[in-house]
Amino acid sequence: MVIDLAKCVGCDACTIACKVENSSPGKIFYAPVLQAEVGKYPKARKIFIPTLCMHCDDPPCMKWCAAKAIRKRPDGIVEIDGESCVGTKVCVSACPYGAMNFFTPEDERIYEGVETPFDRLAKEKFKVGTSQKCTFCSHRVDYGLKNGLKPGVDGDASPACVITCPTQCRIFGDLDDPQSQPSRLILSRNHTTLRPEAKTGPNVVFLYDERF
């Protein structure tokens, strides 16, 4: 995934779309948008940084998971097997991007004291005491592959956050394909990754212009 920071307006549509699509537990969000103030008065301004799992080439969460509950698919998507997770939280500590969440009883409900149908769905899907994170909406990617759709081009084959973004700041596709839109953007724009010193080979790349 490529994220164009110049286009993000901090509307949080991606965060909500992700939560609805994946039925994540109440207080757990896989795709939060961070805010930061840069510059000094009178030229101070706010920037927004969408975050999610980086689906690393060398994911430390997978390396340190003693239960082998974290697996990397052939297409590069990193997933957690909730049934195999034993809740050590080592993956949470190992991730340098803060992308791993741990489902506790306190996370069960979105609103204190009120259980919504959405909360009940989340409890049916996820087990308390297990780790949670973004999956690049792998179920949507698989649907696209099964039905001849192309992720990043056909909406049904792309992550929910990508198709929901009103400014189209998220671009999804195959980085191994030099002709894909993400590959072309990386070649033509200033770009960076989060925490490059971690040397994990993140597959989420951020585009920026000189004002950043």
Image (cartoon, helix red, strand yellow):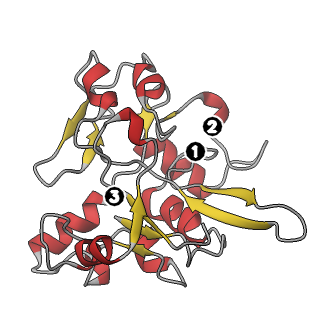
Image coordinates for residue 32, horizontal then vertical, percent? 58, 55
Which residue was labeled with disc 3?
A: 136
Q: Compare marks 1 and 2 and give the one earlier in the sequence.
A: 1
13 or 112: nearer the viewer: 13
Mark 3: few, some, or many residues within 10 Å (few <14, many ≥20)?
many
Q: Is residue 127 above or below residue 204?
A: above
SS for callout 3: loop
Q: Does the CB distance between marks 3 and 2 fall below 8 Å?
A: no
Residue at 40% x, 64% y: name it.
Answer: 191
Q: Is residue 128 above or below residue 90?
A: below
Q: CA distance from mark 1 to mark 3?
A: 16 Å
SS for callout 1: loop
Q: Amino acid at mark 2?
A: Asp
Q: Is residue 2 above or below residue 110?
A: below
Image coordinates for residue 60, horizontal then vertical, percent? 32, 29
On screen, residue 146 versus residue 84, left or right, reads left
Q: Amino acid at mark 3?
A: Phe
SS for callout 2: helix
85 or 192: nearer the viewer: 192
Image coordinates for residue 150, horizontal then vertical, percent? 17, 79
Q: Quadrant of the C terminus?
A: bottom right
Residue at 31% x, 73% y: name it.
Answer: 158
Which mark, by number, is residue 107?
Answer: 2
On screen, residue 181 versus residue 131, left or right, reads left
Q: CA distance from mark 3 to mark 2?
A: 22 Å
Q: CA distance from mark 1 to mark 2?
A: 7 Å
Quarter of image, res 200: top left
Q: Does the CB distance between marks 1 and 2 fall below 8 Å?
A: yes
Q: Amino acid at mark 1?
A: Ile
Image coordinates for residue 24, horizontal then vertical, percent? 50, 50
Which residue was labeled with disc 1?
A: 28
104 or 70: nearer the viewer: 70
